[in-house]
Image (spheres, coloured by chain):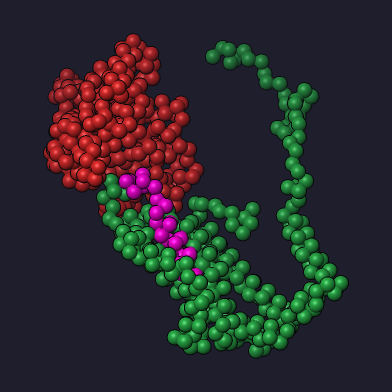
Amino acid sequence: MDATAAVAAVTPSEAETVYELTGVSKTYERNAVVALQDVSVTLRSGSFSSVIGASGCGKSTLLKIMAGLIPPSRGRVVLQGKPVLGPRRDIGMMFQQATLFPWRTTIENIVLPIEIRDGRRAAQEAKARGRELLDLVGLSGFADAYPSQLSGGMAQRAAICRMLITEPAVLLLDEPFSAVDELTRDFMNMELQRICLARQATAFLVTHSIPEAVILSDTVYIMAPRPGRVAEVVPIDLPRPRTLDMITTPYFSDIVRHIRARLDEGAGS
Amino acid sequence: MSAVDQAPPAPKRPAPGQPIAGDTVWAERVAWIDRIPRWLGMSFVFALFIGVWWGLTATGLVSPIILPSPLETLEDLIFVTQNLATGGYMGPALWTTLKTIFYGYLLAILIGFSLGVLVGETAFGERAVMPYLVGLDAMPKVAFAPLFVAWLGFDIHSKVALATFIATFPIVVGTAAGLHAADENARMLFKTMGASRWQTLWKMKLPTGLPQIFTGLKIGAAGVMAGAITGEFLGGGRGFGELIRLAATQLNTPRVFSLIIYLSVIGILLYTFVTWLQARIVFWRKEQVLGGG
């Protein structure tokens, strides 16, 4: 295999599709609210996509459907060629809160998904891999610390490890750093990019922050409310690895301005 | 880089905490009452209590039949202690009461925890069982004492039943509340991990709810004491409660007081034990109960 072929293989637009949602709609029976209408999302291997939109645009409904937590009313949800009919171990998820359990050490928290699925012995064996992940996120030496000894940013790093321990095919990130302070957040986003690049992860991020979506993503889905739908799919053509300096480039500001305008349209309607 | 090299050496400062000339160091005001050490404060309140008590009895303001002097009480306390230590008739009475408390608490924990899980974990329990428990809890439970005696006799069983009856409700409520304490994120996380209901309960909801469960256990500990003694007052038998009732009918108030002091010590020991257990088990959460540091 020559060099050009190797590069082409990791270019997101040509990589194979990992996760595909086609014409997904969701209507909540109890109040007849159309939370999602005809949403299609394609995640290619190794790509980073974000969804951004006002409150009530169906972001969290979309994420719950992608995580296999709730079924869609219509449409197809297919991960790695198999339909999603419930929670799956090839789906990793991360929330706004780190949600580490204070009675478990950091490493015990990280191997919890293994303990749930394969039992205590498998979890014990997975600890070695957990420690490697701690090295990856820069938390070496904190394996046996309790969550109360970790700062907010460190706790989220541990949550990243817990998400990665099952080696999921797709990472679903629900505003993962919105609870940490601004400075830590910028830094953590760059860390997230580094980790995703290192593992060639396929990631899907829900966020309220336009700059965050643009700096991290290859593709940004702009969603509009009532009914929740995809208003526009914006490709972000910035080289990897991205740096925080790119925020000051004219290209970046243009995209941010464009997305903001589209979001304002949605809010006005 | 060169700017760092050329920076003048930092002026020599004394050890941190020692101000030098020009520092604007000033003392924060702390009210004198907040500076009293704990042992001194407690001793003072104790002395004040004994002093007022002594004053009331020594001046004849209160009849010694109603309120014995501190000295009389101390003498009787020594007598009771000797009686207990030398294997006198009070020993078996104390043992009976301790057994009542032990069985009552054990039963209350078993029943209370099971009902708490039923109510806190299942929709059926919450919708169909909880309303009845709330109704039962609202009843004056002591009024059931004669009924328990009629059903279970004058022996220890009727006292255990009353003690259990009173102590169960706080444990049910504590357990049910504890199971609801887990936040939405934790529930969602367990769902995404594909956890079964059982795993979610044991690995997440119960550990999360332990502080509330222990609160229930502590309220239950006070309830079991009250239930055991009330049962012995109202249903006879051979426990400490019966000794108190007898002493009271004989107007032997020093005896009543020293027996009450003994019961208080048992109650405090039980409560302290549960608090100690909580500190050991719920190590991740420091609570300030019964004057923690």
Q: Nearer the viewer, residue B97 or A35?
A: A35
Q: Nearer the viewer, residue B154 or A147?
A: B154
Residue B173, image x and y in percent?
44, 62
Q: Quadrant of the N terminus of chain A?
A: top left
Left/right placement of residue B140 relative to residue A259 reads right
Q: Nearer the viewer, residue B265 or A268?
A: A268
Residue occupying the point 37% across, 16% down: A247
In the rendering, what colour is chain A? red
Residue occupying the point 25% across, 27% down: A223
Q: Does the magenta segment cover residue B176? A: yes
Residue A174, image x and y in percent?
32, 35
Q: Vertical placement of B171 versus B146: above or below?
A: above
Left/right placement of residue B127 relative to residue B290 reads left
Q: Vertical placement of B219 versus A180: above or below?
A: below
Q: Which residues are magenta?
A: B166-189
Left/right placement of residue B52 relative to residue A78 reads right
Q: Vertical placement of A149 versus A124: above or below?
A: above
- The answer to whether residue A120 is seen in the rendering is no
Question: Chain in green?
Answer: B
Q: Nearer the viewer, residue B183 or A200?
A: B183
Residue occupying the point 69% across, 79% down: B256
**Quarter of the image where one finds residue B265:** bottom right
